[in-house]
Structures are given as structure tokens and as C-alpha cells.
Amino acid sequence: MGRLGHLLGRDVEQRRVLDVLGLARNGRGGAVVITGEPGIGKTTVLEATTGDPTGMQLLRVDGYEAESTIPFAAVHRLTIPLHDHLDGLPERHREALLVASGARGGFPPDRFLVGLGVLGMLAAAGERRPLVCAVDDAHFLDPESLDVLAFVARRLEAESVAVALVGRNTQGLLARTAGVPTLLLAGLETEAAVRLLDANLPEPMDPAAAALIAAATGGNPLALVDLANEFSVKQLTESSIAAEPIPIGTHLEAFYVRRVRQLAADTQTWLLVAAADSTGNVDLITTACEALGLPDGASDEAEDAGLIELGRDVRFRHPLVRSAAYNAARGGQRRGAHARLAAAADALGLVELEAWHAAKATLGTDEGVAARLERVADLAGSRGGFTSSASVLAQSSALTPEGSLKYGRLVAAAEAALAAGAGQLAKSLLDDIDEDAVDDISRGRMIAVRATLALFLADPAVMEAGAQMLAAAECFHGADAEREQHALIKAFEYTLPAERLARGATLPELGSRMSKGAEAKGGLSATVLRGLAAHVLLPYADAVPAMREAVAAIADLQPEEMLLYGPASVALTTGLWDATTRHDCLRRTADAARDAGSLQLLDTTLWIMSLAELSGGTPRRATEYIDQVRELRRAIGYDAEHVINVALLAWGDTPVPQVEAIAEGAGALGFGGVQASGVAALAVRDLAEGHYDAAYQRLKPQVEDPFLQVTPLTLPDFVEAACRSDRAGEAKPHVASLHRMADANGSPWNRGVALRGQALLADDDAAEGAFRGSLDLLEAAGTELDLARSHLVYGEWLRRNRRRRDARTHLRAALTSFEANRAPWFARRADAELQAMGEHAPSSGPPAGVADLTAQELTVARLAAEGSTNAEIGASMFLSPNTVDYHLRKIFQKLGISSRRQLSDRLG
């Protein structure tokens, strides 16, 4: 447990950590991040609580600065004792761990996919014996390992695993571990601080003077212990009333610097080499010191002084001691130490360490060292270490002489940072590029990163993102056809979020450039570009064949190709009124992103799925997808409470002014598509409430300024609004347009809504046939909400024609569907119609117990009802199978069932 003197005044903090361990022993995993200023006792608390954890297996790993650019280095060290659990992991998780560790080549895994593998290993190990992972100096971990461990810490629920991360809040430690409970260590209270000081002094000290010392150190335990060991009581008493500051914070490091400089010259040099290495690798340090001609006993004096501990590795008494040993030397001496360490690392085959030390040893530029760093960055990228790759490439660029190569490496660093989700880092790297010094390919890549950043950072520059990707394509033209075509596809995709607010290029210009780009090279990209260009440029009937060909090509893709082309399918399938294929392509894209651990693409795809469900789907499924986005955001440490689908808000009970304000705010940021979808959804709500003129006024501007596949979806609503507000003349041409589109695409969904509009326009003799045709087609199309809306308007028509029995049948069908699919405003309208006929139709509501399920439990329940295994559900929701099983037990209890077979019926 450590010495009691070191834990004076830390009862509350120890209990906090021990509570986490206690819960883990009982199958409730948890985590804590312990942080505070240097010397405050973070490591002491960690060792006291986890050093000998009763009944638990301890895994201990420390962060080292020299490993900070070696991706997954700490994860590899942490999981070495768990390799017997590797074979029990799902294949893609096992593959991700092996590639990340460098044990196997393969597709670079996302760090969160590696995180799922680590979570699985820890969960499996915890089933044998509860497990505690203690990580010290977490601020020095390589960023991939820190992200993985933070991910694991957030997802611990029903595992016998505890994680304790200790570090200073530097290098963004708390930002990267957001979502994990934090324990901030402050200085000791005065009484405890005085007791600690007295316990380490050879004789008693005046209480008043001791209290002044305690106050001057801020209760910093390391400062108090070292002061007691270094100075006499008389000296401390005098210093408590002197003007010179007590050693604390920066002064404490200066104190250690003075102690280092009192050592023999050989010992100082040995300490410098050990401090410059930071990994504690005895073989590396010894090899470097031998090259410097240091005697065998050069470290003895430092060990005798208590500054280091020698064993299987070299451990400094405290990071401030290491920092002091390094900073006590002159710049040339430090570079010399790094040069010797680089040579030693090269001799030992430590490629990453050799490049790291060589860079530290270099003054000015050196293309040889820069090239070695670039190779290390490539190695990091091949293992999925994109943050590390970005950092190393930035170092490589700094050591590269002026010219296109220097800035090309900086562009590559920005690309790697973007791939890692480090948007602000990517932006800062781009800002350092001299655009006049790069070649065309690098310029195109730079422009593409900027355009992507606009979407990633929700920047108003999103309005120009499509035009920027066109500019990138021009840079690639004639030099790299594949990059050119991919940039053109992205130009189309990046135009969609801005919609009518897009600037810098018109839709005809975009279409023309895509058509031209399709000729640059044959293959899948060319097929997709021809489909998109036809969608933009050609009359609808002429465009359909090319659009169909592109959709068919995407539908046949392998999962890894869906990562690239899946998002382009949305506009094409929507334009063809093919909700089934749209859903299938999006689902496959989401599955591919989940399997690859590409959580950024998964986040985007789930967003699109939520939005797409509001046309041709249901608000219920839209809600489930947005809940999955929130769960994903929580898993990666982002704020999940402000995840909003504006259009979905309009379908619920959110006040109209609030939805309008959010939609306007999205428009102000340049996201015209979000704004337009919110307004269109409010118009649907107006229709449900019978505010037909308001619906007409909202939709008319959109209909008069059409935008690709978006506007046709609003035409059925505009037709209903116009018909119900005595503007039937305006509705007729749009009904005809819907029929012409259906003639071209053969979509039952398209024809079904066209017939509904036709029925609203027709006289009583012709209306019924159109209504029935609409119902038949929409049922065949599987578009539940549109089917329910046709039941509703048909039922209303039947009631007005005094066919109450028939009306009752269709209104009940509409009400049941609206309630099941979370369309409350339409449900109220259908219920009002039934009540007008004297029928009391009590709300069926969700099945008993379903309302008590949390969003996470509901998602688990639905996936289980669809036949997914615990492992499959865990992979979908970034949970361990243990946690899934825990949630299912709670679900069964709430629903009053005992097996998965009953889930489907109970969920309705």
C-alpha cells in the first residue's frame, strides 16, 4: 500500500479510486482520471490504491515521451499479458490489434476499432479474475494509445475491469479523456501538510514556521518531502520568513537542477542520456553511454542520491527530476546525447526511436533525417496511427530544406491529422504551407483537406466546399485521374449540405465538370460520375438510365469500397424514389464503417439515415439512428446531448419557434440543407395540424427554387397544402410532374404519392380509384408513413362521403401506424376524425414496459429482436458482450419476458 507518510490527507482521494476497484470486483467496470500539478501525489495515490489490489490482476504501463509518436506503443505493452485472449475476439478486432502492433500487415485500423479489441480482451480477462489497468504519465502516451484507453474507460459497464489513468493536464489529456470521471488532486490541507513535513524531518519544527512552509508549497507533498530531506530545520525556519520562493512548481524543478549540477560530471552526463531517452531502456542507455566513454559506475551517485532507481529499466524519482537532468545541460550537450541515442537505437534495430532521437539531435535542416522521419510516419500510418503520423510528418517537414518537398510533407501531415479527426491540428498545419511552393498534386490535396475541414468543423466555408473540391479536381487533372474523379464525387457530396446556399460553382458547372471527369478514366468512379452528372444536367427521364447504372454498380460493391462510394448512393437512390435500395446502401455503408472502425464515416452515415427516414421511412427509425449517433459520440468522448436532427424535432413536440430558430441557425452557418429539411418538416407538421395555408407558405419558396432530388420529395406535401388551401390550380402541374417521374423510374413509392395527390384533386367519382391505387402501391413499396397518410386522407374522404364504416377502417389503420412510428401530430389528426364519428380510439402507445427502456436499452432490444448476437450488438454499439448481456437482463425484467423470442412481440 505504500508508506503511510506519503498518504497523509489523502483518505478521500484513495477511497474514490478504491471504490472504482471495488465495483470492478463485483462486475461493474469503471474508470477514473487522476490529474494535478507536478509533485502533488498522483503517482503515490495510484500506487497506494492499485499497487497490490486484493483479488485483482494488475496491468501497469507508463507513458514515455520517446514513445509518444510510436502508435499504439503503450497499448501493445499493456496487452502483452492478455494475448491468450486474442483468439476469442471477433476476427476484425483481432486483425486490428495485430496490424496496430505491427505483428501483421493489413488495412490500417481506426484507433476505435483497436479500442474494441482491447475492450474485448480486458472483458475476457476480467471473467477469469477482476482486472485493474494502472497507467501513469498518461500525458506522455502516444495519442492512439491514449484514445484507445479513454475509449475503453468510457465503455466499461458490466465488466470486471477498472482503469486508472494518471497524468498532468498537458498535451490535452483531459480533452482526450472527456467523458471519463476525473479526480483532481489539490495540495494537502495545512494540518496534513505539517504532519508530512514533520514526519520527514530529523527533529521537530516550530508549528507556526511549518504552517508557513506548508502554505508556501501549497501543500505539495513532493516539495514538502524533498525540502525535509534537503534542508535542516534551522534552514527551513529561516526560509519560511525569507523573500526567496519556496521550491514549488517551476521553482521545484530549479531546485532539482541545482541538485543535479552538484553531481560528478560523468554522473550528470549519464543522467542526461537517461533523461533524453525517457523510455528507461537500459540496453539503449548503456549502449549510448559506452559510446560516450562513460565509466561503468557513472550512475551510482545518482542512485545513491535517490534521483533514480535501477532495475530492469531506469526510473526517475519523479518526472521533474528527469526534466531537471535534461534542462541542466546546454543545448549542444542535449543534441549530443540524442545523437548517441540515435546511433544506439539504430544498432538495436529500434527504427522509430532512431528517427526520433536523430531529429532531436539535428540543428537546422537535414533531408536525410527528414526522410527517415517520413518513413517512420508511413509506418505509423500503415498501423492506423494517423495522429502519430501527422506529428512525425510535421517534424519531417520542419527538418526539410525549403521547397515543394517540405510543404508536400506538411500537406500529408494535414491529411493524416484529418484522418485522425484532429480538425484543428489539420487546420494549423495547412496555415503553415507556402502555397506558391507546392506542386499541383499537393495543392489539390491541400484544397481537398480545406474543403473537408469546412464540413468537419461546421464552418460557414461549407458553402464553398463543393466549389473547392472542383478546384482540387482541376489540380489533379492530367496528372492523377483517380484523384480527379474522387475529388469530383466529393464535390457533389460536399454541395449537398449547403444546397441552395452553395457558392463558387453552379449546379450546371458541377454537372458539366463531372461529365468531363468521367472520361478521364474508366471504371466504377466513371460510372458513378456519369450517374451524378446525368442527375444534375439531363431531363429526368433521360437521366434515369445512367442513375440506375450507377446505383447498380454501388449496390454490388464490397464493404471496403462502400466506404468510398456509399455516400454518393443517397442522392441517386432518392432521385429514383427507391427507398429500399437507399436504405440497403446506407446500411451497408454503416456496416462497412463500423467494421473498419471508421467512426467519422459511421457518424455521418447514421446522420444521413436519420434524415432519409423522414422521407420514405418513419420518424421512429429516424429517432433510433439519431440515438445511435449520440451513443457513438459518447463512445469517442464528444458531447452527445446537443446532437439534433432539426427535421426530426419538427415531427415531435418541440415548439415550432424553437425548431424555426435552430433551422435558421443552421442556415446562418451555411448548412442550407439542414435548414430546408427543417422547414419542410415544419410544413408536414402544419399539414398534420390542419394549418394548410402555413404549410403552403413554407413549401412554395422551395418548390419555386428546386434542388435536385430534394424538391420532388416535397411535392406531395405541397400538393396537399395547395389542395386544402383552395389553390388546386397550383397543385395540378406538380401531380402531373410526379406521374411523369413515376413513368420514368417505375417506383411504386413515387406512383403511390402521385395517385394520392391525384385523388385530392379529383371529383368524387374518380377519387376513390386513385386512393385505392395509392394504398396498393405504397404497401408494395414498404413506405409505412406515406401508406398511413394515404389511409388518413382516404378515411377523411370516406367520412365526408358518409361512408362511416369504411372510413373507420382506414382511420384506425392510419392511427395505429402513426402511433407505432412516432408521428404524434398525424396520430392526433386521425384520432380527431374517429372521435368526430363518435368513436373513442384510446392511444395504444408503446407496449407495456417499452417506455421504461433507455435509448441504449431500446437499441439493444431492437438489434436482439432482429436476431443479432451479443457480440454483433456489442460491435454495433461499441460495447463488450458482457455489457450487452447485462442490458438484455434489464430489458427482460422491464418488459416482463424471459427470452429473445418474445422481444419482437413485446417491442411491437
Image (cartoon, rainbow, N blue to C red):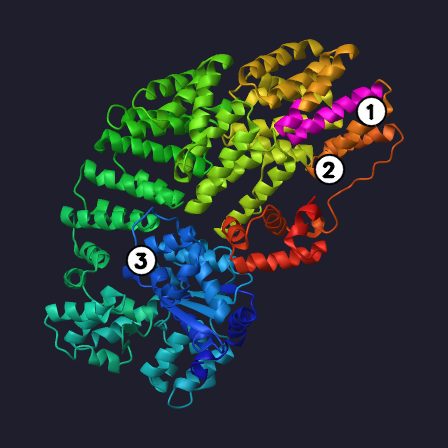
Check the image and name the residue furthest to the bottom: 203
Magenta-colored span: 777-800
Q: Which amino acid, by three-letter code, is at mark 1? A: Asp
Q: Are marks 2 and 3 in contact (CB under 8 Å)?
A: no
Which residue is drawn at the image coordinates 47% and 76% (left, top)?
Answer: 53
Q: Out of 356 and 398, give the one closest to the viewer.
A: 356
| Callout 1 secondary element | helix
Q: Is residue 209 visible?
A: no
661 above or below 878? Answer: above
Which residue is drawn at the image coordinates 39% and 71% (left, top)?
Answer: 39
- In the image: residue 28, left or right of residue 257: right
Q: Out of 776 and 12, give the one closest to the viewer.
A: 776
| Callout 2 secondary element | helix
Q: Is residue 11 visible?
A: yes
User: Would residue 337 be counted in the magenta stretch?
Assistant: no
- Between tags 3 and 1, which lies in front? 1
User: Would residue 778 be counted in the magenta stretch?
Assistant: yes
Whichever of labels 1 and 2 marks the residue nearer the N terminus, that label is 1
Task: Quote the CA–CA distance across marks 3 and 1.
Answer: 72 Å
